[in-house]
Amino acid sequence: MKLKLTLLAIAIINMSVAFGQGNNYTQKYTKFEGLALTPPMGWNSWNKFSCNVDEKLIKETADAMVSSGMKAAGYTYINIDDCWHGDRDSLGFIHPDAKRFPSGMKALADYIHSKGLKLGLYSDAGSQTCGGRPGSRGYEFQDALTYAKWGVDYLKYDWCNTEGLKAEGAYKTIMAALQKAGRPMVLSICEWGTDKPWIWGPAVGQLWRTSGDIFNCFDCVEDHGTWKSFGVMQIVDKQDGLRQYAGPGHWNDPDMLEIGNGKLTPGEDRAHFSMWAMLAAPLIAGNDLRNMDKETQSVLTNKEIISINQDSLGIQAFRYAKANGFETWFKPLSHGKWAVSFLNRSATGKKIAFNWQQEKIQDDVFNKTLNANTIIYQIKNAWTNKQLGTTKGSLKTEVPAHDVLTLILEPK
């Protein structure tokens, strides 16, 4: 009897030790579910304003998003990028720069929410942000609590000054912190594609960068010495082989839009927007919404192009053909529809003679087929909203240099 009691006491002690070693303190490293079921749409301060951000700019941008029709078109997030930070207090809690944001972030969030919009903020997994402000390394749980208290809805989390860190672990840590804080937020993984975030990112965040930064040109590479940024077409090329990882709630992110920032032609703006829509990419505008011309506004609010991007299937387009700077892309849509983009990357116009019934379009990744011999499709130009007949005949037209023709095919 004494032996049995002794064994029972040992078992109880062992159980106590096991619980004492942390079995009751597991963390949740997975993202908030139900967010970004279509690619996020919004605005970010970095491409146009870099570190020159303040409360006045953000409020005026929120106002402009509503008055310009951007909100009605589906844009939701007002995202403040780097350089909003002030210092940490004696307990380690971050505060906004008091000169730039004198009312504080909670008041700013309340203002943005009053417009029916959502607030996004920026931080970094390292000791400092890319702009030299306080990073979140070592303060992840404090920062998450602060963001939740302020009412933040979206967190862009960068990867500067991260010596010795492993990306997957660092992003799991900030997600665990956000989960503990309890306010659902979209997590934008801005790790530049270095550690293949499309492999582990779908469980941790809603979107992940697939490359380095975009540069405001159509077809170039900007060499900064120790790093490079890429033109619109270079970013498109970097999406090869990634489409199987994208879908509702988890998106490949080819970086923010440069439309309206003054260096792209109107045709290049259309091509840029069309390809981001085809790629099921987040549509995060990067221009000055307060001073948009009508042409920029018409591109960013084009209803049909946005419908391609926001389609509920969430399937990313694939490149069907390319030759001499001319490419054909297909994207399956819901209800049996398809989007097609004829992209002219070359410096001269290109003529199209596309016989729908001689082409059988097969998407092996998502098991979708476009066969114009068995189904007749009505063709609509997504940019002009004009009907172009059906797939019974051939498509014969010309696409200007650095421009695009984007079509929506709908079964009759």
Image (spheres, rainbow, N blue to C red):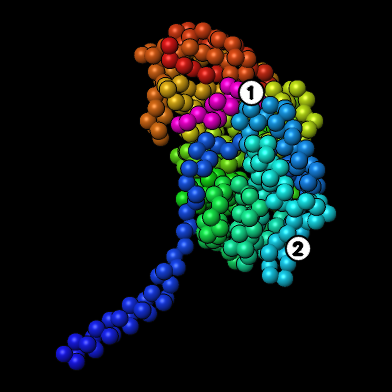
- Point 36% across, 79% down: residue: 16
Say if residue 264 shows up in the picture.
Answer: no
| Left or right position of 390 against 220 | left
Q: Amino acid at mark 1?
A: Asn
**Three-letter amino acid code at disc 2?**
Asp
Please state the horizontal and vertical placement of residue 64, each as a whole percent of the image: 74, 32
- Residue in the image at 47% along x and 59% along y: 28
Q: Please tell me the numbered disc located at residue 87.
A: 2
Q: Which residues are magenta?
A: 301-313
Q: Nearer the viewer, residue 282 or 224?
A: 282
Which residue: 59% across, 63% down?
Answer: 141
Question: What separation in Å lies between label 1 and label 2 (alpha carbons)?
Answer: 41 Å
Q: Residue furthest left?
A: 1
Q: Residues within 10 Å of mark 1 (few under 14, many from 20)?
A: some
Q: Are marks 1 and 2 in contact (CB under 8 Å)?
A: no
> Does residue 312 show up magenta in the picture?
yes
Closer to us: 188 or 338: 188
- Judged left or right of residue 213, residue 48 is right
On the image, numbered disc 1 is attached to which residue?
302
User: What residue is at 56 percent from the left and 58 percent from the top?
Assistant: 181
Q: Position of residue 160 (x, y in %)?
A: 67, 57
In the shown orientation, is residue 131 left or right of residue 362? Answer: right
- In the rendered image, residue 106 lying in the magenta stretch gets the answer no
The N terminus sits in image quarter? bottom left
